[in-house]
């Protein structure tokens, strides 16, 4: 398989190869999924979702990286990635723009998790 460009905006030409298309799709910038810098409403939606979901708050603010999966489950904490995904779906579904709704199906779960996870960690670091 040929090398994919480092830059998010430079993709190989479409060869019709499904694997190449998946690599291209996976190489998109996280910022294009949810345009955090363009509107503070997305941060507000994330914070509102966290306020409404105590279990997510406990899991996301816990020191879960040092806990085993079974220990997390015994403590009633879900996986952080599951909560990030649920938050991403909430944010995208809550937006009035139908293009944002389409992103739920356009991007795979891992990409949505990374988009929220990175923003969450940035907010934790800033505040």
Image (cartoon, rainbow, N blue to C red):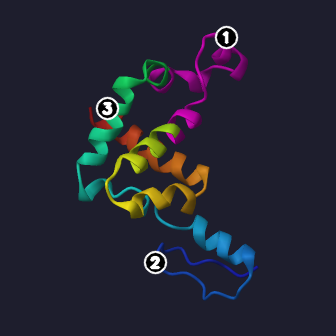
Tell me the number on the disc at residue 48: 3
Residue 57 quadrant: top left
The CA distance from mark 3 to mark 2 is 32 Å
Please report contact status of discs 3 and 2: CB closer than 8 Å, yes or no.
no
Q: Which residue is mark 2?
A: 9
Q: Which residue is mark 1?
A: 74
The quarter in which the N terminus is drawn is bottom right
Q: Which residues are magenta?
A: 59-85
Disc 3 packing (10 Å; few <14; some 14–19; many ≥20): few
Percent of width and height locating residue 61: 44, 23
Disc 2 packing (10 Å; few <14; some 14–19; many ≥20): few
Where disc 3 sits, the SS reads: helix
Please indicate whether residue 66 sits to the left or right of residue 96 in the image: right
Numbered-mark total:
3
Of the two numbered discs 3 and 2 in the rendering, the one whose residue sits closer to the viewer: 3
Percent of width and height locating residue 5: 56, 78
Residue 69 visible (yes or no):
yes
At 51% from the left edge and 67% from the top edge, which residue is drawn? 28
């Amino acid at each position: 398989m040929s090398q994919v460009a480092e830059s998010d905006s430079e993709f190989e030409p479409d060869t019709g190869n499904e694997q190449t298309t998946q690599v291209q799709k996976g190489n998109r910038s996280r910022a294009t999924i949810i345009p955090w810098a363009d509107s503070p409403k997305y941060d507000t939606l994330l914070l509102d979702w966290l306020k409404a979901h105590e279990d997510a708050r406990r899991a996301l603010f816990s020191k879960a990286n040092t806990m085993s999966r079974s220990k997390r489950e015994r403590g009633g904490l879900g996986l952080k990635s599951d909560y990030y995904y649920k938050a991403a779906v909430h944010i995208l579904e809550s937006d009035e723009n139908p293009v944002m709704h389409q992103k739920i199906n356009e991007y795979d779960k891992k990409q949505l998790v990374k988009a929220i996870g990175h923003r969450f960690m940035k907010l934790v670091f800033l505040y």
